[in-house]
Amino acid sequence: MLKDYIWDRIASTEKHIVFYGTGDGADKIAQKVESLGKQVSGYFVSDDFYRSGKMFRGKEILTLSKAEELYGDFLCLVAFGSRLENVLNNIEKVRLSHETLIPDMPLCGDVLFDETFYESNRTKHEKVLELLSDDYSRRTLDDIIKFRLTGNPDYLFDCQCSNSEYRNILDKKYTAYADLGAYTGDTLRRAIDDYPSIRLAVCMEPSEKSFKKLAEYTNTFFEPDTIIVNAAAWDKEETGHFIDSGGRGSKIVNQNIKPLSGSKNRDVEYLPLDHVCDIKNEQLLIKYDVEGAEIKALKGSKETILNNNTDLEVSVYHRSEDIFDIPLFVHDMLPEHKLFVRKLSGVPAWDILLYAVGK
């Protein structure tokens, strides 16, 4: 049983609490810290991002050296996400001098992955462990849970894998590819490079800006035949709200709420993949990265999945419950498929992928 829960540690510290990073994520973490009766002493950024006079939450943004001058031996909370190697190296440098934790806030929904949440989902954790097909996946899942509960970066860095370690799971000659949450076409490009046997691609992307870039990219080649749809992947046809940031932070929302950081809140079309295409008898790979709507999108593509020899790549990190609920849902739909979990490089516990691989 873990005892060093991150929020208990923050609540009990006598040190100054200083954030590494600013932005929407830092704002959420600061609100949680304040709910524990603690105050954030200051905020700093990497030297490359420092601009004199910039403010965040009423405080001047500092460099690390200035934060050390003001606050001495502080507790550092990493309050941003990144995959960049130089940024990850900066975090390691901070850890050499300061106790450093990385809070993991949900990207979607309001359910925090804390000890209360985990205890209520312990049985699901055990079920998912039984379903996973290799020890690597089981260690990855356990490390992700330990990280989310403690904020200890060691658990996160220990379970990250290289590109070859996750791509080797999928070694088939796919003839068709569906990309739900296609963004600007980066994952389509990767799929075409990895599987030149693909003859047909279907891409869904609700963001206006990203869809425009996707269209520009797909216009540059003749093969594979490509269908692109400016809509959110869903389980039925309807119109709904969408916070459009043009990148991370874009998400489907239940109501017309005020977006953060200048993002647009607009109505978009929600569509099931089953209504977008009629793919049958193909060796099909479907990728789901739909900002917390993964189960809805899976439901909306059930016919397509079952009408083909289909493998899945599903993001399982947007909501706290995704790490348990999505593997269980996929297993119920595809009980004969093998399940694997991989965590790509980066902080915090984002880019966690579930693979469902058939015979």
Image (cartoon, grey):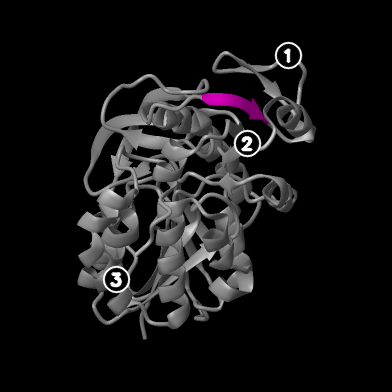
Badge 3 crowding class, 10 Å Cα cut-off, few under 14, some 14 to 19, many 20 or more, is: many
Tag 2: amino acid: Phe
94, above or below 188, in the image = above
Q: Quadrant of residue 134?
A: bottom left
Look at mark 1 in the image and give the residue it sits on: 53
Point out residue 199 in the picture as x, y percentages from the top left corner. 51, 68
Q: What are the residue bounds of the magenta stretch?
A: 40-44
Q: Nearer the viewer, residue 206 or 325?
A: 325
130 to 285, vertically: above or below: below
Q: Residue at x 57, y 34 (%)?
A: 15
Magenta stretch contains residue 22: no
- Whether the residues at callouts 1 and 2 have beta carbons within 8 Å, the answer is no
Write down the residue under mark 2.
Answer: 74
Q: Which mark's residue is nearer the viewer, 3 or 1? A: 1
The disc at residue 132 is none
Q: Nearer the viewer, mark 1 or mark 2?
A: 2
Residue 284 x %, y %: 41, 71
Which residue, given by chain and number where applicable, does mark 3 sit on?
128
